[in-house]
Amino acid sequence: MGEARARQDTLTKPLGSLGRLEVLSVTLAGIFGESIPKIRRKTVILAAADHGVVAEGVSAYPQEVTPAMVMNFLAGGAAINVLARHSGADVVVLDAGVAADLPPNPALRSVKVGKGTANMAVGPAMTRKQAIQCLETGIKTAQELIESGTDLIACGDMGIGNTTPSSAITAVVTGTEPSVTTGRGTGLVDEALANKISVVRRALEVNQPNSKDGLDILSKVGGFEIGVLAGAMLGCASRRRPVVVDGFISGAAALIAWTISPAAAQYFIASHRSVEPGHEIGLQAMGLTPLLDMGMRLGEGTGATLAMHIIEAAAKCLAEMATFAEASVSERTDSQADGGEAQG
């Protein structure tokens, strides 16, 4: 990172004039362990699963939407497919626990932990063994992708009802009241939102998850796709590669990974600020500042994939810009290097 910072200070621009791009490039150097990191291949891990808590009326959409959207991903017709094509990223779709039998597809990885979680409002969402299976699946997936050449991974999700466990996870880890962490999800009206908040409170009262034990939180109020994404984040950290955190559900997965291994957050890059209120609370707890604020709340890894352009640009500016010496451009001669916009 010191070498990257020193190089930034010799590039043909006023000191600090590329703002967060400069900071991001130095962070990337630390993550990769290389003074000039290069991003050659990008991949989106998109994990899908269902949630038993939908029985409590917490979503405006029926559970049948989850498998239908997985088929849409495989056909290339979803927003994430468009943005991934635009950014030149591959999309790896994981069936982590869809409550339906999906037809075989070469683009689909079946890692099903179960056909949807149990209803967390009346008991644990999954067993501790299943929680471990989720994490191990995510770790293995990320590590395999990195070993095959991926340098940048974005984490996306699909699962009707998954903002409810995400609200619960965020409340537990950050110590925040559920009424603050719980949002409208797919567009709930006021009465339905009040019910959703009540369901999250009930889940926490029934299960009493240990805020210091990420596995306990995941097993009691989590989701299969959330656990897989948390594992993928740990897998990226273990292989010194950045992972791009998407919106609220991806952020909840990051909180699980961070609770298990606090150092893992050094490898997280927050892509955008979701409209869901709990998202920013979780990011602040981990000390992460999002790159974008686009009013997005779709999930799927859309915000993370959009942010890949900025992350790649930061790395390329560090690697490809000429230094003052290389370009035969005079550097500042005064000692007041204020990083202004004009090269006087």
Image (cartoon, rainbow, N blue to C red):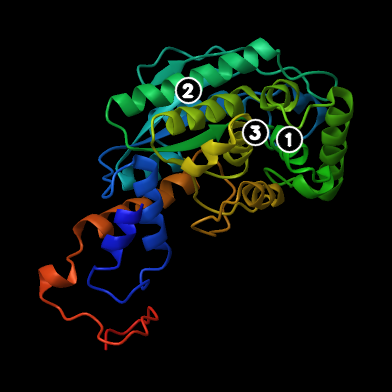
Location of the C terminus by quadrant is bottom left
Please tell me which of labels 3 and 2 falls first in the chain: 2
Instruction: Name which quarter of the figure residue 305 lies in.
Output: top left
Q: Distance between the residues labelled 3 and 2?
A: 16 Å
Please name the residue shown 33% across and 60% down the image. 5
Report x, y in % for residue 299.
Answer: 55, 41
Please tell me which of labels 2 and 1 falls first in the chain: 2
Question: Dot 3: few (<14), some (14–19), or many (≥20) neighbours within 10 Å?
Answer: many
The amino acid on which the numbered mark 2 sits, given as a three-letter code, is Ile
Please name the residue shown 69% across and 43% down the image. 185
Mark 1 sits on what residue?
164
The amino acid on which the numbered mark 1 sits, given as a three-letter code, is Thr
Mark 3 sits on what residue?
259
Question: Dot 1: few (<14), some (14–19), or many (≥20) neighbours within 10 Å?
Answer: many
Q: Label 3's element?
A: helix
Q: Are marks 3 and 2 in contact (CB under 8 Å)?
A: no
- Say which mark, if any, is on residue 199: none
Report x, y in % for residue 227.
Answer: 60, 25
* Count of numbered circles in the view: 3
Please name the residue shown 17% across and 72% down the image. 324
Mark 2 sits on what residue?
139
